[in-house]
Image (cartoon, rainbow, N blue to C red):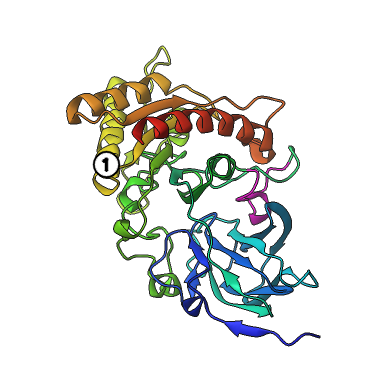
Amino acid sequence: MTALQISPLSVLPQIRALGRHRGRNPLPLFWTASGAELLFTGSELWFQLECDYTDIEPWVSIELNGAWIARQALTPGRNRVCAFRGMTPGTPKHVRLLNDVQPMQQDPTHFLQLNAVEYAGGEFLPLPEPRCRLEFVGDSITSGEGTLGARQEEDWIGAFFSAENHYARLTSDALGAEYRLVSQSGWGIVCGWDNDPHHTLPPYYEQVCGVAEGARNTALGAKQQNDFSAWQPNAVIVNLATNDEHAFCNPAWLDPVTGKAYKLRTLPDGSYHPEDVRRLQDAVCDFLTILRERNPRAVLVWSYGMLGSGLQEVLQGAVQQYGSRSGDTRAFYLPLPDTTADTVGSRQHPGVLSHRAAAEVLTAFLKHKLEEQA
C-alpha cells in the first residue's frame, strides 16, 4: 500500500473550511453542510474524523468533481473516510466533505470534528474564489430532514438528514456560491412546533453554534460569538415560521419548572389571534434588524411555503413593516413552492423534488437581486 502523509488543516491553507468555526486544528463541524473543500492532484485522499454521540450518529457525504459518491455513518471515536484512491496522479480532483446531520441540542455528547487529511503524492491547489457567499437560516427543511429515505418513513434518525438533495446546496451550486447553514429541526421564530418558547433560532444566531451543548462543543468554540467580519455573505436567506404555524394547531407547552403554559392561539373562527400575529411580526422585524447589523452588505430574503403557507400574509407584512421602520430597501419576502404528494420525502417533509423546485425559484430571485446590487 502507498505510504500516506498526514497533515492537519492548520498547515494546509489551500483547504477551505466550510461552516461556522473559530479554529482549524481541529476543525469542528457543527452545522449541517459544514466540512471541507479542496483541490488535490495526488492519487489518494482520506479524511481523519472524530465524533461521539448518544442518540443520533453523525453522517458525512463525499463529493468528487461535483458528483455525490459516498455517504456513511460514523462510529464513536476516530474514523477514516476515503475520498478517493487509485486515481490518476497529476490530475486535479475537487473534493467536498459535508456534515449531513444538524447539531443535536438534546444530546450533549454529540460532536464531530475534522482532525487531518491523509494523502499520497500530489499537491493541494488554491481553490477559485466563490462568485458569492450565501447563508441560510432555518428549521428541519434547512437541516435537510426528509431528503433521504422512503416516503413512508417516520422515525427521527440521522439517516434521513442530508446536506445533499437540498435547496441550499442546489441554489449555491447554481450560483457558484460558498454557503453556510444555521438550522434546527422543529424550531421557529417565537416558539417551536410544540409551542416551546425556548426553541427559537434568533437568540443563537450571533454565536458560532450556541445550540450545541456539552463540554466538547464548548471547548471547540460553539458558545463563542461568531466572527462576522471573517465571512460576509452576499445574501442571507431565512426559511423560518413553518413550526410557528404548526404551533397554532398544537397543544400548549407547559414549562416543567414554573408550570406556565405557552400557546400560539387561534380565534373561534380559526383565524390567528391578533396578539400572537403581532408577536410574530415583531419577532421577524427584530431578527431582520440583527441580520442587517451583522451582515450590512447582504440582501435579506425571508422565504417560506415549502410545508404550507398559512402565515404568508403575516410574514409578508412583517418584512414590509421592517422595511418601513428601518428604511432598509434590501429585505424581501419570497414565497417558495409548496410540497405536494408528488414531491414529498420521508417524515412528511420536502423531498428532493420539492427542494429542486424551491432552488429554482430561489436561484432566479437571488441572481436578479445580486445583479442589481453589483
**What is the quadrant of residue 81 in the picture?**
bottom right
Point out residue 323 in the picture as x, y percentages from the top left corner.
Answer: 25, 27
Point out residue 364 in the picture as x, y percentages from the top left corner.
Answer: 52, 28
Point out residue 175 in the picture as x, y percentages from the top left corner.
Answer: 53, 40
User: Does any portion of residue 272 appear in the rendered image?
Assistant: no
Question: Is residue 162 within the magenta segment?
Answer: yes
Q: Which residues are magenta?
A: 153-165
- Along the line of sight, which residue is nearer the eye, 324 or 219? 324
Residue farthest top in this picture: 269
- Along the line of sight, which residue is nearer the eye, 156 or 362? 362
**Left-right relation of 2 to 334:** right
- Along the line of sight, which residue is nearer the eye, 347 or 146? 146
Residue 74, placed above or below residue 199 = below
Which residue is located at x 60 percent, y 63 percent?
55
The residue that label 1 is drawn on is: 292
Q: Assign the C terminus to one quadrant of the image.
A: top left
Residue 164, placed above or below residue 96 = above
**Left-right relation of 194 to 80:** left
Which residue is located at x 39 percent, y 16 percent?
271
**What is the quadrant of residue 166 in the picture?**
top right
Q: Give the overall secondary structure of the magenta segment.
A: loop
Residue 267, placed above or below residue 19 = above
Instruction: Categorize mark 1 by other alpha carbons within 10 Å: few (<14), some (14-19), many (20+).
Output: some
